[in-house]
């Protein structure tokens, strides 16, 4: 009995140690990201470009099981060039680079019938589109910083409260075949909290419909959870736990930004539909206000 108690105590201590490590890593990363985001559009674009290069490396590890090959070079160059072009306003050319990138990767592939080749080629737009979406939103001179801050707050709130709600209430699994730990209580709690956080942010910036921005936040929250689920399915397909061991307690960068990537893409599509010339404002200012 005493041995069982010791074992339980050891497990609880280990869980607490893991949680502490995760919190410390998350706080350090969030602080760095927020400071650079606040510093300006160019520093933010450079940060996103660095993150994109890391994601390309993790993609190569997951899909092809390699730390370095010629396809990684092509993939990284295509994504980084598109980042630079978008940061300087060359939107059409940047999108063309992302479209051509998979074809160039295919040309450089020695084995044209290699397993997972299609997934490998998909990595160019899968990583490239979300990162240029974030660069574009941050580039709005009036609302760029607020747009990215809003996106961070919404997605981070969804992640935090999905974890808390799922652990607190449990219940039916959300997608047991893909991610056995995810529950409906976690999903509902997370996206509800994200919608509330987004509406609060709307109240902070003012001049917008809280109902409308709350609904947009709900949509972004749902999409971010789908992005999280997609990466879980991807990792399950390749039988891996984490994209890499880059971040202590968290795994790889992919494991931290999977929801943010799809959320950023949807946020950018909303801005494209309503006002391409002022993407940050289009995302945040609703109901004719402003």
Image (spheres, rainbow, N blue to C red):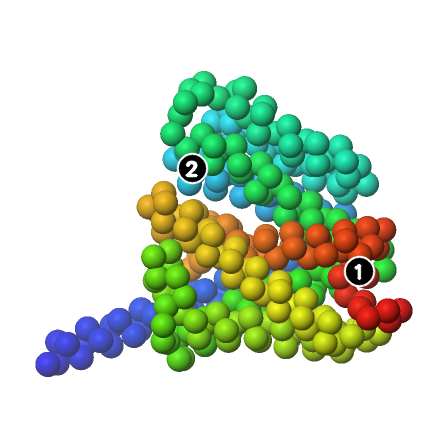
Check residue 227 in the rendering and tell me which mark sits there, or answer none.
none
Helix, strand or loop for disc 2: helix
**Is residue 270 at least partly visible in the picture?**
yes
Residue placed furthest toward the right:
290
Point 52% across, 55% down: residue = 227
Give the labeled residue for mark 2: 63
Q: Is residue 39 visible?
A: no
Q: Position of residue 233 (x, y in %)?
A: 41, 51
- Cα–Cα gap, marks 2 and 1: 36 Å
Q: Which residue is mark 1?
A: 282
Q: In the shown orientation, is residue 90 left or right of residue 27?
A: right
Instruction: Classify 26 as above or below 164.
Output: above
Using the image as rendered, state which of residue 263 and residue 33 is in the foreground. 263
Residue 272 left/right relative to 62: right
- Among the 4 quarters of the image, the one containing residue 270: bottom right
Q: Where, by quadrant of the figure, is residue 28 drawn?
A: bottom right
Q: What crowding class fits label 1: few (fewer than 14 Cα within 10 Å), some (14-19), or many (20 or more)?
A: many
The location of residue 148, given as percent across then percent down, is: 71, 60
204, above or below 64, in the image: below
């Amino acid at each position: 009995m005493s041995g069982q108690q010791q074992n339980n105590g050891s497990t609880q201590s280990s869980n607490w140690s893991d949680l502490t490590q995760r919190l410390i890593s998350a706080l350090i990363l969030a602080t760095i990201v927020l400071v650079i985001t606040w510093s300006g559009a160019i520093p933010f674009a450079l940060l996103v470009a660095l993150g994109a290069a890391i994601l390309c490396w993790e993609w190569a590890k997951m899909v092809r099981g390699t730390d370095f090959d010629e396809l990684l070079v092509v993939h990284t160059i295509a994504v980084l060039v598109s980042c630079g072009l978008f940061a300087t306003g060359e939107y059409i050319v940047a999108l063309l680079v992302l479209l051509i990138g998979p074809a160039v990767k295919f040309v450089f592939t020695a084995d044209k019938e290699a397993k997972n080749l299609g997934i490998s080629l998909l990595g160019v737009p899968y990583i490239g589109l979300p990162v240029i979406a974030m660069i574009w939103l941050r580039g709005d001179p009036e609302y760029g910083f607020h747009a990215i801050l809003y996106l961070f707050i919404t997605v981070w709130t969804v992640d935090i409260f999905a974890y808390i709600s799922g652990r607190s209430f449990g219940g039916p699994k959300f997608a047991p075949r893909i991610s056995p730990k995810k529950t409906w209580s976690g999903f509902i709690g997370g996206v509800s909290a994200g919608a509330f956080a987004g509406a609060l942010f709307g109240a902070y910036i003012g001049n917008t419909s809280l109902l409308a921005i709350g609904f947009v936040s709900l949509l972004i929250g749902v999409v971010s959870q789908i992005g999280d689920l997609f990466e879980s399915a991807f990792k399950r397909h390749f039988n891996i736990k984490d994209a890499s061991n880059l971040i202590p307690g968290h795994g790889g960068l992919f494991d931290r930004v999977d929801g943010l990537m799809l959320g950023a893409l949807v946020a950018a599509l909303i801005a494209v539909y309503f006002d391409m010339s002022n993407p940050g404002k289009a995302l945040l200012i609703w109901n004719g206000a402003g």
